[in-house]
C-alpha cells in the first residue's frame, strides 16, 4: 500500500485470494504483473532451489481403493 496505488493492490489481493497465493510475495508478484501489463506467472528457471512438482490426473477409480491398514 505504501508503494503502489490502492486499486492495484486491492485487485491483486482479490486475485491472490482467488488462486490461493496468500503470501506477501505472491501479492507483490500480482501487483507488479498488473502494473507492467503482463500475465502473472512464476518463471521457475529463475528459482532453481524450488522443488519441481509433478501432479498427475486423478481418476475416479482411485477413490474406490480400500484404505491401507497399518
Image: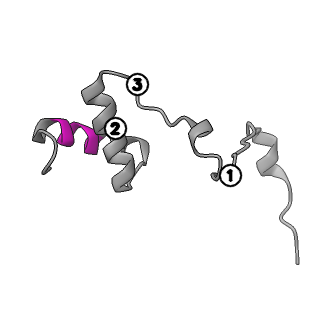
x, y percent for residue 37: 30, 21
Give the structural element (helix, strand or loop) at label 2: helix
The tag earlier along the polypeptide, 3 or 2, is 2
User: CB of mark 3 within 8 Å of CB of mark 1?
Assistant: no
CA separation in Å, label 1 and label 2:
22 Å
Q: Is residue 66 left or right of residue 14?
A: right
Q: Which of the two discs, 3 and 1, labels the residue nearer the N terminus?
A: 3
Residue that label 2 marks? 30
Q: Position of residue 69 (x, y in %)?
A: 88, 74
Distance from Cα at disc 3 to Cα at disc 2: 9 Å
- Residue count near mark 1 (Cα–Cα under 10 Å), binned few <14, some 14–19, many ≥20: few
Residue 17 visible in the snapshot: no
The boundaries of the magenta stretch are 8-14
Residue at left offset 68%, top offset 51%? 51
Residue occupying image coordinates x 18% and y 42%? 10
In the depicted view, which residue is nearer to us: 61 or 40?
A: 40
The answer to whether 3 appears left or right of 16 in the picture is left
Picture disc at residue 51:
1
- Say if mark 3 contacts mark 2, CB within 8 Å: no
Badge 2: residue crowd in 10 Å (few <14, some 14–19, many ≥20): many
- Which class describes the residues within 10 Å of circle 3: few (<14), some (14-19), or many (20+)? few
Quickly name the residue at label 3: 39
Coloring applied to the structure:
one colour
**9 part of magenta stretch:** yes
Amino acid at each position: 500500500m505504501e508503494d503502489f496505488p490502492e486499486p492495484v493492490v486491492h485487485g491483486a489481493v482479490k486475485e491472490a485470494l482467488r488462486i490461493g497465493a496468500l503470501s506477501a510475495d505472491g501479492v507483490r508478484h500480482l501487483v507488479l504483473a498488473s502494473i507492467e501489463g503482463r500475465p502473472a506467472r512464476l518463471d521457475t528457471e529463475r528459482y532453481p532451489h524450488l522443488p519441481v512438482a509433478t501432479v498427475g490426473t486423478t481418476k475416479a477409480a482411485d477413490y474406490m481403493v480400500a484404505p491401507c491398514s497399518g
